[in-house]
Image (cartoon, helix red, strand yellow):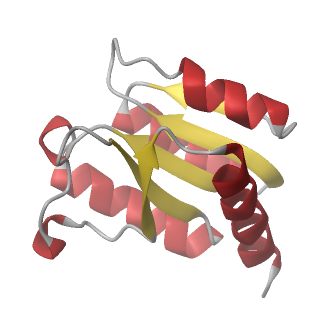
C-alpha cells in the first residue's frame, strides 16, 4: 500500500472555506487532498495513507460511525487524526463526543503549529 509521509487529507463539509489551511499547508510544501465526503475520505486514507487527516467542522456534521471507521483506518496506517474547529464555535464540547481524535486544532492555525503537527505526524507514520 503506497504511503506519502508528508501528505495531508482534509475532510471538510461542503461549502466550507478551506483556503486558509490549504494555503498554510501549501507553504509547507506538502501535498493536500480535500474531500467533502466521509466515504471518499475513507477511500483516500485507505489507499494513499496520508500522514495527517484533518476533519473540519462540528460533531453534528459527521456520522459518528463513519468517523469511527476513519479512526480504525488511521490506527492501521499510523495516520494522525485531528479535528479542526473554528475559534468562535464550540464544535466538540465533551470528551464522550470524541470519536477517537488524536488532537484538536482551532482555526486559524498558525504556520508554526501546522509545521509541528505535520512533522510529528510524519515521524509517527515512519516509526514501526
Residue drawn at x 12%, y 73% is: 96
Q: Would you place residue 92 above or below residue 62 in this image? A: below
**Quarter of the picture holding the N terminus:** bottom right
Residue displayed at 34% across by 11% down = 15
The location of residue 20, given as percent across then percent down, is 57, 24
**Most foreground residue, 6 or 20:** 20
| Image quarter (top left, top right, bottom left or bottom right) of the C terminus | bottom right
Q: Judge left or right: residue 84 versus residue 73.
A: left
**75 to the left or right of 88:** right
What is the x, y in percent for residue 55? 41, 45
Left or right: 5 with respect to 32?
right
Q: Residue 62's spot in the image, x, y percent?
A: 22, 41
- The quadrant in which residue 34 appears is top right
Can residue 100 be spotted in the picture?
Answer: yes
Q: Position of residue 98 (x, y in %)?
A: 23, 67
Check the image and name the residue furthest to the right.
29
User: Which residue corresponds to the image point at 72% horizontal and 63% vertical from the top-left?
Assistant: 116
The residue furthest bottom is 128
Amino acid at each position: 500500500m503506497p504511503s506519502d509521509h508528508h501528505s495531508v487529507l482534509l475532510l471538510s463539509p461542503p461549502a466550507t472555506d478551506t483556503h486558509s489551511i490549504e494555503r498554510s499547508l501549501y507553504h509547507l510544501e506538502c501535498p493536500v487532498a480535500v474531500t467533502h465526503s466521509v466515504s471518499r475520505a475513507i477511500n483516500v486514507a485507505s489507499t494513499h495513507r496520508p500522514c495527517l487527516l484533518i476533519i473540519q467542522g462540528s460533531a453534528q456534521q459527521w456520522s459518528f460511525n463513519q468517523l469511527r471507521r476513519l479512526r480504525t483506518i488511521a490506527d492501521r496506517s499510523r495516520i494522525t487524526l485531528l479535528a479542526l474547529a473554528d475559534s468562535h464555535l464550540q464544535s466538540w464540547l465533551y470528551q464522550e463526543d470524541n470519536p477517537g481524535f488524536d488532537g484538536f486544532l482551532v482555526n486559524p492555525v498558525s504556520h508554526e503549529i501546522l509545521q509541528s503537527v505535520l512533522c510529528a505526524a510524519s515521524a509517527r507514520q515512519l516509526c514501526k
